[in-house]
Image (spheres, helix red, strand yellow):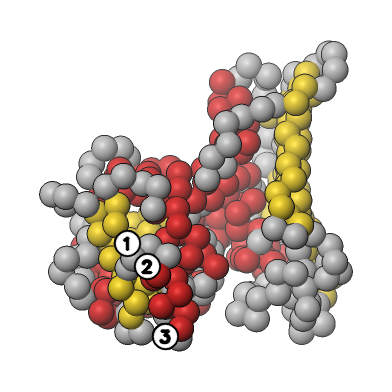
């Protein structure tokens, strides 16, 4: 356990690495010790924002005995390599979502954490966003009755060259976008019995927009929609609708020209819709604060467990299998 500040090394100096560096600056007792990027200019730019050391070799942070934890903000295809290396070096690890692209890599990271006796947490971001957390509490309380159905969506243009959120290294929507909402669905409903998907293609090949139906043995269902082929002028949009026996919740967020425009409405069983107002907070800071608290033993890491990330990954893989095989897939069969 650290005796003074928790010193964190960040692997990745892209938008997510920069966001994590900024968010950690608000957490008392946490210091960013260094930021890695293979591009010296990017490492230096990100490190300057938090007075950290810029490095172009990840081992400079992983092998530094003065660093307590590693925050992995690299592309998902690289997660297993660096997460397992950091754990083997005795570091606690926070890993961004998508956790992995295959179950084998996810299990390897989970086993590495068990073997090292270190904390491994995953950025299941929806669990740290106030609107999603509010609905989770409402569903668990039973105050609105049983959850009957839900839908969630995530729409962007990252697969279009020239799109507002274009990313060359991103994979198809089942992992890059749907993972977040698959985790939200499982947080509320648990693992479904069947996943059935349909998709429209993208110009670069593979699915560009996916609709997935998640069915439960008790008759309940969830729909998850994700698109990376919206027109370049379409703002990145996310949201959900949750229907309960005695009411419903609906949330929508549009990100346009750097501005966030959000709505969150509760529809009671009778009467007029009600706007839900919650305190504004930075979800990245929220999850990284939880990570820091877990390192010093203040709380339990179960909320952002890698096992929950693995479960969301199995839904992504079931989704991919359904698209290839044109049938419903039981995610419980994926090991």
Which residue is rendered at x = 60% and y = 54% of the image?
Answer: 180
Q: Residue at x 47, y 66 (%)?
A: 17
Mark 1 → mark 3, Cα distance in angstroms: 17 Å
Direction left: furthest residue:
3
User: Could you tell me how far apart the alpha carbons at marks 3 and 2 are, in whole angstroms?
Assistant: 14 Å
Q: Position of residue 115 (x, y in %)?
A: 22, 63
Badge 1 element: strand
Expressed as whole percent of the image width and height from the top left, the position of residue 156 reads: 76, 63
Q: Earlier in the sequence, mark 3 or mark 2?
A: 2
Viewer-closest of 249 and 149: 249
Badge 2 crowding class, 10 Å Cα cut-off, few under 14, some 14 to 19, many 20 or more, is: many
Q: Which mark is residue 240?
A: none
Query: Dot 1, how many residues are within 10 Å of its Cα: few (below 14), some (14-19), or many (20+)?
Result: many
- In the rendered image, which residue does mark 1 sit on? 32
| Vertical placement of residue 44 versus 116, above or below | below
Badges 1 and 2: C-beta atoms under 8 Å apart?
yes
Q: Secondary structure at mark 2?
A: strand
Kindly report which numbered mark, 1 or 2, lies closer to the viewer in this rendering.
1
N-terminal of the pair, mark 1 or mark 3, is 1
Q: Is residue 106 left or right of residue 316?
A: left
Q: CA distance from mark 1 to mark 2?
A: 7 Å
- Residue 10 — which label? 2
Q: x, y (%) of residue 147?
A: 68, 29
At 75% from the left edge and 69% from the top edge, which residue is drawn?
Answer: 164
Q: Is residue 61 left or right of residue 277?
A: left
Which residue has dot 3 on it? 40
């Amino acid at each position: 356990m650290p005796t003074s500040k928790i010193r964190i090394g960040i692997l990745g100096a892209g938008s997510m690495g920069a966001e994590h560096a900024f968010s950690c600056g608000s957490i008392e007792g946490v210091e960013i010790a260094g930021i890695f990027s293979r591009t010296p200019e990017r490492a230096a730019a990100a490190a300057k924002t938090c007075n950290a050391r810029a490095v172009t070799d990840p081992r400079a942070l992983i092998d530094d005995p003065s660093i307590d934890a590693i925050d992995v903000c690299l592309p998902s295809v690289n997660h297993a390599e660096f997460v397992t290396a950091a754990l083997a070096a005795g570091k606690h690890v926070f890993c961004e979502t998508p956790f992995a692209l295959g179950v084998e890599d996810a299990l390897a990271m989970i086993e590495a954490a068990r073997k090292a006796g270190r904390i491994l947490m995953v950025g299941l971001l929806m669990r740290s966003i106030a609107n999603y957390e509010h609905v989770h509490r409402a569903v668990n309380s039973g105050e609105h009755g049983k959850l009957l159905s839900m839908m969630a969506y995530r729409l962007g243009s990252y697969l279009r060259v020239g799109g507002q959120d274009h990313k060359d290294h991103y994979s198809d929507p089942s992992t890059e976008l749907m993972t977040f909402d698959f985790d939200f669905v499982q947080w509320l409903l648990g693992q479904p019995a069947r996943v059935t998907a349909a998709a429209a293609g993208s110009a670069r090949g593979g699915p560009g927009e996916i609709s997935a139906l998640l069915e439960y043995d008790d008759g309940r269902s969830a729909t998850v929609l994700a698109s990376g082929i919206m027109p370049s002028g379409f703002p990145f949009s996310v949201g959900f609708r949750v229907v309960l026996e005695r009411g419903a919740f609906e949330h929508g967020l549009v990100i346009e020209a750097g501005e966030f425009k959000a709505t969150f409405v509760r529809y009671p069983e009778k009467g007029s819709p009600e706007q839900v107002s919650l305190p504004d907070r930075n979800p990245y800071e929220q999850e990284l604060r939880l990570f820091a608290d877990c390192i010093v033993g203040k709380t339990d890491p179960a909320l952002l467990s890698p096992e929950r990330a693995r479960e969301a990954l199995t839904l992504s893989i079931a989704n991919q299998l359904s698209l290839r095989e044109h049938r419903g897939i039981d995610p419980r069969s994926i090991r």
